[in-house]
Amino acid sequence: MQPNPFKLERYFAQHEFTARHLLCSSDPESMSIGELLALEPDAMDGLRETWLGYTEYPGAPALRREIASLYKRIGENEIIVHTGAQEAIYSFMNTMLTAGDHVIVHMPGYQSHYSVAEALGVSVSPWKAREEAGWALDPDELETLVTPATRALVICAPHNPTGYLPSREVFDAIVAFARKHGLWLFSDEVYRGLEHDPADRLPAACDVYERAISLGALSKTHGLAGLRLGWIATKSAQVLARMSTFKDYLTISNSAPSEYLSAIALRHTDALIERNVSIVRANLRLLDDFFARHADRFAWHRPRAGTIGFVRLKRAGAERFSAELLERTGVLLLPSTLIDHGDAHVRLGFGRRNMPDVLAILDTYLDATDTSTAS
Ligand SMILES: Cc1ncc(COP(=O)(O)O)c(C=O)c1O
């Protein structure tokens, strides 16, 4: 199997560690190991004593218990820990889909949600977010997309790249549709917990539907992407059995230090969420002002959750705008050409502490290019 190159990841491979100012990151502000260890008095001793043999293949039981506490109806044996959410996406697609199947995928979206399936010979129908409605999904469209070969519906909420969060009503309609057709509901929930108003948090799909697979990770909600730790949670014994077996050909088991540190992070989920959402809220206030002042250049739907939004450029192509901005200022945006969504949008990240400084550089650049066609 040879999936198409992951365009967004190739772009980050080229620029993430060389661009002077990142303005499109989806992971919030991270922290050092020292800061994480400071959350618990004995944490340093525990790290020193962490045994560096193989770990249990689905993840250490203590870690899985912490993960299970994020859900209402999931036990520690209904979780498989992976090396990042990405490994779990790859494993799900490889184990639960086969050539000739059909899947419906929330788009624009994260490329592995459709490229891995396509590489397996699975046909993909996009379920298109509607920009004019704030990037909303219309559940009524699902009946027009389903075929006898449809096996799975893939959604991402809170959404990358638009920041869209369905209402409870829409979420329930999605689950009802999946149940009616007996579909796997692969629910990418890696930004779950980063709702800007906690009252908006949706249930985890695995808590409400027996054929749902909830995807979680420490990369986004907790801001700890370097731990490379993700998981799936599901009531389906079939999914658990197949994905366990497949993992033997991937990473077998996880990194012991990472599992140890991840358990600490999970015990402090609420505090880490509070920290990350407060950065997001402050940044969004600046963005409200920024987009009000630049309404002639940009259109934007203020996200209700997560750390990213999808901004339409009114004057220039996204690829050219992003390339010129990077060259002249060192500010990195992500053009929509890399998300298979035309050339009119950029992804903007607002989860980092330095966003106000980077936004100011963009502001100055816009003023300087106001009379040109640069945006
Ligand atoms: C929607 C979505 N799913 C999965 C991933 C992969 O997460 P991880 O870094 O934990 O592998 C990302 C990372 O950007 C993402 O945005």
Image: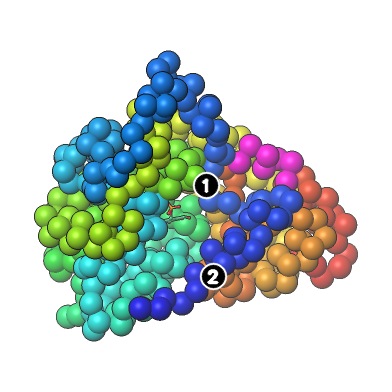
Mark 2: which amino acid? Answer: Lys
Verify CB contact (< 8 Å) between mark 1 and mark 2: no
Q: Front-most of 347 and 14?
A: 14
Establish if 38 lies above or below 367. above
Report the residue at 62% width, 74% height from top.
343
Q: Which residue position holds label 1?
A: 27
Picture quadrant of ligand 1: bottom left
Q: Which residue position holds label 2?
A: 7
Extreme residue in the top direction = 41
Q: Quadrant of the N terminus?
A: bottom left
Q: Which mark is residue 17?
A: none
Question: At which x and y percent is residue 133?
Answer: 47, 61
Q: Quadrant of the C terminus?
A: bottom right
Extreme residue in the left direction = 237
Determine the secondary structure under disc 1: loop
Crowding at label 2, few (<14), some or many (≥20) Cα neighbours within 10 Å?
some
Establish if 343 lies above or below 287. below
Mark 1: which amino acid? Answer: Asp
Residue 309: which quarter of the image? Answer: bottom right
State which region is magenta. Answer: 352-358
Question: At which x and y percent is residue 320?
Answer: 72, 71
Report the residue at 63% width, 37% height from top.
353
Quick check: 13 left or right of 21?
left
